[in-house]
RNA sequence: GCUGAGGUAGCCUAGCCCGGUAAGGCGCCAGCCUUGAAAGCUGGUGGCGGCGACGCCACGGGAGUUCAAAUCUCCCCCUCAGCGCCA
């Protein structure tokens, strides 16, 4: 949520920033929010005036009663005040609600360095690592490869749970766990605290961390309960300090979340649809940081470097893009995507999303920065980045490390987590 | 799930029965004192609106009664404890 005071003090700056998003609706909401805010302030003053009179009359009546007298004319005036006050308060509440609804729908202000562009085709490549090689003749799609190895059950999963679900079994499960542990160890080494968050969140904190549209499109709701399955551990990690005042001297707080992620919408169909690239459920190790405002650009680069390090150590070629204005989404002020190279698909595909959300989430969550037990008005910045989403990283490995006989070499950095094992070969038991 | 106790400022607590400007402590800030610090003393220390004088709000949320609600009534939410169930 944008600071309402910024809207009042620097409307032209806010407007110019919103204009870069090329969505006339935003400018309309912006204008309406300013109007509603001005009307609200007028309504507030009117209600305050009536409340003041009520308080004065109440005190006078009380004083009169205390000295044994009565004051019929004051009581007569006081008696008809509540009707007026009720109307004034209703107007005040309505205008505030209208303003806040508009304010909540407005996207975050974008960083100056976000490139202008219409959609993901215009994201700006800012770094590349490794040498993308075209896929060899006969390279199998990852879903086929997994099935051939006896390590995945897609049809059975569809019968049990529907499209977009999977059973994994055998060596791929151990590889999945190895990836998570590897990423977690890397982050712990770099000062992050590993966190197992709740996998379900109430609606109120959830509204603080995500685009409202996500409630319809992305999140699974638990029937009959005020609970949503998390779409990423970013969300419960952001809510960890809900309503708190963070000590300035304790920032930045670096957290490494590990959790399954649940998503209703999994995007369109595409190359190699069968498999685990687009699924309703996957495992993810996530970086999350609460930082002082002035530190957030540097922290953003730090978590990007950590995510890059994961793929470097896995020896998977990738590139980094600076996500453009048309592809940024509402919450982030700036976002890098890391796109790994998928030789079978012959394309770079998103495996990491790395965002600086500035004060947008923290303000909604009522989180502030204070010093030595003293509450302040400053709002911290929040940042998040994938370290590894195992579904996609596994697909990258299944393509990049697939051997001519269909077995999968294990990236050397992961071997210690698999008892030194060097490759995944066909499962024979329990077919 | 049942029963009980609770939710008051950054934190802790009083006030509630019996309606009348939300008291105190801790922490924090400033001043005094001190070579410096601690202690001690004095004052300050929430949010919103207003250029300001100032006013309003804030006792989990909402509704009601009343001239007036932290306080009375009703509904809801949350937390904790005990019991039950349970990996």
Image (cartoon, coloured by chain):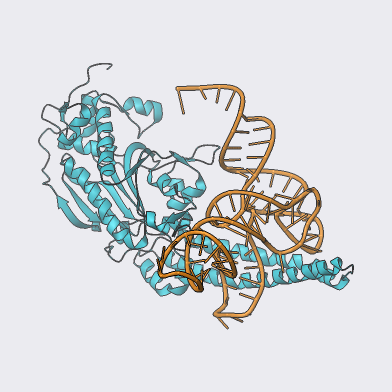
The chain coloured orange carries which letter? Answer: B
Q: Specify the quadrant of the image occupied by residue A21.
A: bottom left
Q: Nearer the viewer, residue B60 or A364?
A: B60
- Location of residue A396 with respect to A71 vertically, above or below: above
Find residue A233 and report its image quarter: top left
Residue occupying image coordinates x 24% and y 23%: A150
Counting from the top left corner in percent of width and height, residue A283 is at 33, 37
Q: Residue at x 31, y 56 (%)?
A: A327
Quadrant, the C terminus of chain A: top left
Q: Residue at x 23, y 55 (%)?
A: A321
- Please identify the residue farthest to the top as the structure is shown: A429
Which residue is pictured at 20% across the width and 43% down the height? A311
Q: Colour of chain A?
A: cyan
Percent coordinates x, y for residue A330 in the rendering: 39, 57
Nearest to the observer: residue A354 or residue A165: A354
Left or right: residue A379 versus residue A52 is left
Which of the pair A269/A81 is nearer the observer? A81
Residue A421 in sight in this render: yes
């Amino acid at each position: 949520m944008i600071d309402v005071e910024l809207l009042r003090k620097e409307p032209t700056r806010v407007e110019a920033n919103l204009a870069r998003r090329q969505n006339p609706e935003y400018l309309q909401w912006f204008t309406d929010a300013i109007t509603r805010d001005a009307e609200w302030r007028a309504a507030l003053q009117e209600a305050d005036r009536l409340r003041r009179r009520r308080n004065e009359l109440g005190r006078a009546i009380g004083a009169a009663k205390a000295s044994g007298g009565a004051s019929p004319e004051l009581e007569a005036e006081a008696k008809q005040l509540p009707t007026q006050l009720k109307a004034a308060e209703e107007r005040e509440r309505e205008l505030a609600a209208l303003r806040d609804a508009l304010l909540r729908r407005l996207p975050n202000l974008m960083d100056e360095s976000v490139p202008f562009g219409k959609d993901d085709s215009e994201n700006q490549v800012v770094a590349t690592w490794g040498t993308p090689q075209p896929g060899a003749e006969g390279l199998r799609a990852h879903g086929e490869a997994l099935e051939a190895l006896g390590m995945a059950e897609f049809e059975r999963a569809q019968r049990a749970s529907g499209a977009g679900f999977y059973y994994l079994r055998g060596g791929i499960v151990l590889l999945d766990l190895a990836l998570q542990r590897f990423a977690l160890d890397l982050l712990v080494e770099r000062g992050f605290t590993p966190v197992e968050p709740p996998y379900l969140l109430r609606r109120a904190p959830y509204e603080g961390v995500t685009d409202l549209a996500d409630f319809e499109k992305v999140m699974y709701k638990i029937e009959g309960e005020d609970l949503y399955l998390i779409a990423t551990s970013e969300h419960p990690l952001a809510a960890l300090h809900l309503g708190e005042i963070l000590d300035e001297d304790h920032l930045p707080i670096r957290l490494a979340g590990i959790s399954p992620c649940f998503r209703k919408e999994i995007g369109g169909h595409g190359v190699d649809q069968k498999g685990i690239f687009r699924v309703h459920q996957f495992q993810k190790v996530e970086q999350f940081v609460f930082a002082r405002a002035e530190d957030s650009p540097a922290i953003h680069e730090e978590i990007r470097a950590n995510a890059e390090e994961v793929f470097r150590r896995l020896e998977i070629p990738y590139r980094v893009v600076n996500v453009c204005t048309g592809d940024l989404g509402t919450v982030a002020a700036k976002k890098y995507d890391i796109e790994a190279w998928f030789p079978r698909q012959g394309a770079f595909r998103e495996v990491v999303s790395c965002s600086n959300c500035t004060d947008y989430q923290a303000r909604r969550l009522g989180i502030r920065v204070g010093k030595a037990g003293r509450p302040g008005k400053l709002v911290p910045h929040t940042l998040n980045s994938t370290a590894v989403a195992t579904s996609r990283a596994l697909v990258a490995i299944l393509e990049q490390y697939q051997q001519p006989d269909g077995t999968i070499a294990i990236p050397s950095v992961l071997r210690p987590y698999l008892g030194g094992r060097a490759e995944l070969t066909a499962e024979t038991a329990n077919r």
